[in-house]
Amino acid sequence: MRVCVVGTGYVGLTTGVSLAFLGHQVTCVDLDQRKVDMLTAGRCPIYEPGMDELLAEAAANLTFTTSYAEAVPGADVVFVAVQTPSAGDGSPDLRYLRSAAETVAQHLDHDFTVVVNKSTVPIGSGNWVDAILRESFAQRDDRPGRCEFSVASNPEFLREGNAIHDTLFPDRIVIGSDNPRALEVLNQLYRPIINQTFTAPSFAPRPDDIGAVPLVSTDLASAELIKYAANAFLALKISYANEIGQLAAKVGADITEVTRGMGLDQRIGSRFLQAGVGWGGSCFGKDTKALIATAGEYNYEMPIVRAAREVNDRQRLVAVERLQDELRILKGRKIGLLGLAFKPNTDDLRDSPALDIANLLLARGARVRLHDPIAGERFRREQPELAPYLSETLDGLFDDCDAVVLVTEWAQYLELDWSKFVGLMRTPILLDGRHVLDRDRMARLGYKYLAIAG
C-alpha cells in the first residue's frame, strides 16, 4: 500500500520505518527540515536501539519530505502522529492535530483514504478530526471528482527502547472506525504482522513463542479509550508497588520480595511492579492527566487514577527525603545522579524523575552532578539550566560525593565496577532508586546501601 506518515517523532518514525520494512511504500512528512535532512541521509534523530539498522533496510521503500503535497496524494492510509502535549488544565493540546488534519484535507485525491489518528488523543477526537477533514476538504476549489476518506483510530503501545520489537511483534493491534471499509484497509495493511509472514530482521529476531497477533477491531470511541485505559492501568500498577514499598519500609519488609511474591500470581503478573522513584516519559503522566480531564467533562471523578499520579509525584520527593534523613543536612552536600533519561535505552527526558530530583536537591542547597551514558547531548539542548551540572565522566561524578543516586537502570551502571569508585567518595552512600543493585554486594564493597522503599 501507499502510506503517508505525518510526524517523525518516536511513534511516527517507528511506524513509517516498520511499514516500509514490510514492503509498503511510505512517505514521512515533517515540517522540521533538519530532521528530514538527517533521515534522508540515513541518520536517526532519536536514540532507539535497532532504528538505524531498520532505517537502512527499509530505505528503498521510504521517503522523507517537508511537503504534504508530496506525501498525501495517492495515499491509501495517512497516519497522523503529531505531538499532543498537555495543556494547562491537563487536557491534550490538539492544535498540532488540527493543523495536520486541515493540511491533509487540502491534498486528499484518492478514491478512498483512511486517515488514522496514531497520536494519543482524547475520546471523541476521531469524530472531531473527521469534521475538520470534511470542512477543510469542502473549501477546496480543486476538489477531485471522486475522493472518499474515513477516519480511524490505531493507538500505539510502544515501549521506548523496545519500539521496533513492539511494532513487529506486538501483543495486539487495535483498530477502530465506524466505517467497515476503513477497518478492512487497516486489516490488510497489518496482515504481515498479524500473520507473522515477514522475514524478521537479524537484529530483532522473531520470538519463539509468538503466534498470530490478536487484532481488536472496534468502533472509534472504544479504540481511543483502550489506549488511555491501558496506560492508566500500568501507571496504577507501578504506583501501587511504590505505595506498598513505603509501607514495607515502615514494617521492615523487603519490597523486592513482596513484589516477587505478588507477581508470581498469574492474575497479577510481575511486569510493572518494580518499586522505585516512579514512572516518567511522555505517556503515563500525560495520559492519566488527560483521562481525568476527559472524565471531568462528563462530571465524573476518577479517584484511583488521581491517586496513582499523587503517589508517583511523591516518590521523587521520597528520594530527596531519604538522602536528607541520612545526611541530616543537604546544604553544601555533593550529590551525584546516575541516569537522566526516564528509562534505559532511550534519550527521552520527558517527565524524567531525575530532573525533579535534581531540582529538589538544588532547592535545598545541595550541589549536584549528573551523568547519563546516552542522553547527555539531548539534555544540554533541552535542559540548559541544569546542563552546567552535567559530568562527562563517572570519575568526575563520584569524586568527593556525599551520596550517589541510581535513578535510571542503564545496563552500563548495573555492570559498573563499583569497587573502583567507592574510594573517590567523601561518604560512600548509595541510594538505589530502582531496587536493582545487590544490597549485600554493595555493602561488601564499602557502600552504605539505601533503598527508596523497604
Image: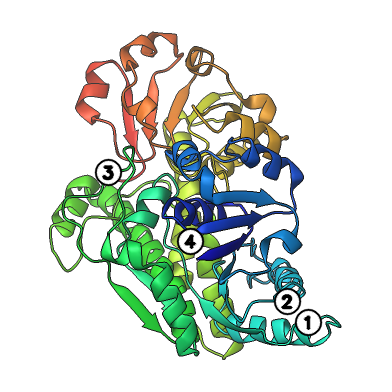
> Which residue type does callout 1 highlight?
Ser
Question: In terms of sequence position, does the residue under pointer 4 or pointer 3 come before the other?
Answer: 3
Residue at label 4? 284
Residue at image x 28%, y 59%? 197
Give the numbered dot on residue 205: 3
Question: Front-most of 444 and 25?
Answer: 25
Instruction: Tell me where residue 32 appears, x and y as whole percent.
Output: 74, 48
Quadrant (top left, top right, bottom left, bottom right) of the C terminus: top left
Q: Kindly report the distance in space between the C-alpha atoms of the residues bearing marks 2 and 4.
A: 31 Å
- Is residue 168 rendered to the left or right of residue 116? left
Give the numbered dot on residue 136: 1
> Circle 3: is it few (<14), some (14-19), or many (20+) Cα within 10 Å?
few
Instruction: Tell me where residue 348 appears, x and y as whole percent.
Output: 54, 44
Q: Kindly report the distance in space between the C-alpha atoms of the residues bearing marks 3 and 1.
A: 44 Å
Closer to the camera: disc 4 or disc 3? 3
Q: Secondary structure at mark 3?
A: loop
> Which residue type does callout 2 highlight?
Ala
Residue at label 2? 105
Question: Front-most of 11 and 321?
Answer: 11
Residue at image x 64%, y 26%? 389
